[in-house]
Amino acid sequence: MIQFFRKIRLKLLQQNPPERTRSVRAGQFSKYLLYAIGEIILVVIGILIALQINNWNENQKKKGQLRQYRNNLVTELNIDLETLDSLNQLRISHEGNIKNYIAYYNQEELNITMLRQKKDSVIYSINSFNKSSFTLDELGTTGDIILFSEAEKRAIAKLKNTHEIYQYYERITVDGVVNFVQDYVTVTDSFYENKVSAKQHKSVEDWQLNVNSDQYRLFHNQLYSVTVLYDFQKNIVYPAIRRDTKALLTILEENLKSDHD
């Protein structure tokens, strides 16, 4: 466009060339000055157009980057919700084994052989939630959080805060369970307990036939610590993470839908 205007100006100059003599008449000087001003205006217009195009390109680039961030977050947050569901299903199954053992142990009349069978059927996990939404961390590192709307920023900050607080306390609780497990392991024969060997060490032989043994006490301590962990995850940790994950997910999906409309 600037070339188009310049061609018009050159054509006018060729038709009315300014006379450069020692005695330039006022009218001719005014005409030359007008041409000079025209050149300046053309340059300014060119600069403004270039800036406008550059700003448009930058805005389009930022919009594309924001859209990609939103898509990544939606994918990752949905994976987090699936992970929470899987952990919850595991917890329900393992919690059932523990409750079944405790219910039998609390009976007035105990059959030690049956108690041992119940004990051997107890299976549990001490998993903790690990998020897949790594884009949340990337936004903090790159500073690209500024691309998001205010509602998204608030939802992102809230979810990150929930992750940090509850995962910290969950990790402490898991460490406590591990300590109780270690106490139990040190007074048992791991080879025999895990069926690596059919022989049991003499120092702990047949302790499972004595419900008053130290090993049963330590076994019960670890089961109790596991139930505390499960209750904490079920009632506090995972509901809070799920709530704030869904809240952010809803906002992101609405904004992505608006982008396509």
Image (spheres, rainbow, N blue to C red):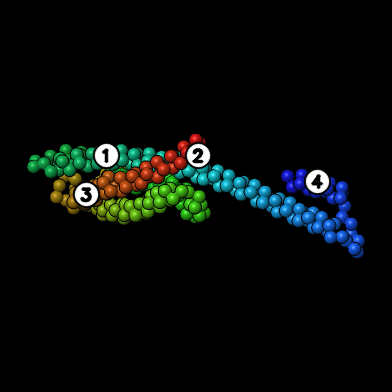
Q: Nearer the viewer, residue 151 or 101?
A: 151
Q: What element carries label 3?
A: helix
Kindly identify the residue that appears in the image at 90 percent across and 63 percent down: 23
- Mark 4 lies on a secondary structure that is helix
Is disc 1 surrounded by few (<14), some (14 to 19) or many (20+) residues within 10 Å?
Answer: some
Whole-angstrom CA distance, mark 3 to mark 1, is 15 Å
Quarter of the image holding residue 91? Answer: top left
Residue under the point 91% across and 61% down: 21
Whether residue 246 is visible here, answered yes or no, is yes
Separation (CA) of disc 3 from disc 4: 89 Å
**In the figure, is residue 201 to the left or right of 251?**
left
Residue beneath label 2, please?
259
What residue type is disc 2 on?
Answer: Asp
Depth check, mark 3 against mark 4: the one in front is 4
Of pointers 3 and 4, the one earlier in the residue sequence = 4
Among the two numbered marks 2 and 3 on one chain, the one whose residue lies closer to the N terminus: 3
Camera-side mark, 3 or 1: 1
Position of residue 212 measured from the top left corner of the image (x, y, whole percent): 14, 50
> The disc labelled 3 sits on which kind of residue?
Tyr
Label 1, secondary structure: give it: helix
Q: Which of marks 3 and 1 is nearer the N terminus?
A: 1
Residue 90's image quarter?
Answer: top left
Front disc: 1 or 4:
4
Q: What residue type is labelled 1?
A: Ile
* Image location (x, y in percent) of residue 32: 82, 56
Q: Name the residue under label 4.
A: 7
Give yes or no for contact between labels 2 and 1 (Cβ–Cβ under 8 Å).
no
Disc 3: which residue: 224
- Along the horizontal axis of the image, is 110 left or right of 187? left
Query: Looking at the image, is 45 positioned above or below residue 21?
Result: above
Local SS, label 2: helix
